[in-house]
Amino acid sequence: MCVFCKILSGEIPGAKIYEDEYCIAILDISQTTKGHTLVIPKRHVEKIFDLNEKECAAIMKACRYVSNKLKEKLGIESVNLLNNSGNLAGQVVMHFHMHVIPRYVNDKFKVIQPSNEPDFNELNNLKNLLNS
């Protein structure tokens, strides 16, 4: 049983701040920044590909709720929503979860965003492939 399933079953504690029929939100024990929260589906699924539509909707609703609660209680103005689905993406716990990471001035958390020159021909080819 994975660590998130153990939290969901009550076998180990979790600092829950939200719950609905499909998911829970708990404070991340690592606290990358103050208020860092994980939104976790109640059903054990590994990756985003495995979620059903109701779970997806519930997870995004929970992310919005948590983000607004962090804004209200901690005064944040910015947030990162982050998911690592699969080994190549850096997933460590193999139970889907969405990170809600509040952002603060000088918080030292970095999201890598490459700055490649756009190749509009390649983008057009990819668009055509994905729309076929």
Image: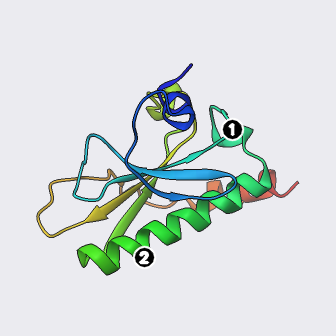
Q: Is residue 92 left or right of residue 97?
A: left
Q: In this view, does 58 lie above or below 50?
A: below
| Distance in Å between CA atoms under marks 1 and 2 | 25 Å
- In which quadrant of the rendered image does the N terminus lie? top right
Give the colouring mode of the picture.
Answer: rainbow
| Camera sees residue 18 | yes
How would you rate the neighbour count of disc 1 (Cα within 10 Å): few for under 14, some for 14-19, many for 20 or more? some
What residue does disc 2 label?
68
- Give the residue furthest to the left: 106
Amino acid beneath label 2? Asn
How would you rate the neighbour count of disc 2 (Cα within 10 Å): few for under 14, some for 14-19, many for 20 or more? some
Residue at horizontal 32%, vertical 54%? 36
Tag shown at residue 43: 1
Q: Where is residue 38 in the image (x, y as percent from the top left)?
A: 44, 49
Task: Out of 90 and 63, give the one closest to the viewer.
Answer: 63
Q: Earlier in the sequence, mark 1 or mark 2?
A: 1
Amino acid beneath label 1? Arg
Q: In this view, does 35 lie to the left or right of 81?
A: left
- Give the residue furthest to the top: 1
Q: Where is residue 90 in the image (x, y as percent from the top left)?
A: 43, 32
Residue at horizontal 22%, vertical 55%? 33
Image-quadrant location for residue 71: bottom left
- Give the residue furthest to the front: 10
Q: Position of residue 67 (x, y in %)?
A: 42, 70
Q: What element carries label 1?
A: loop
Q: Do the residues labelled 1 and 2 touch (CB within 8 Å)?
A: no
Q: Is residue 7 left or right of residue 74?
A: right
Q: Is residue 93 above or below residue 52?
A: above
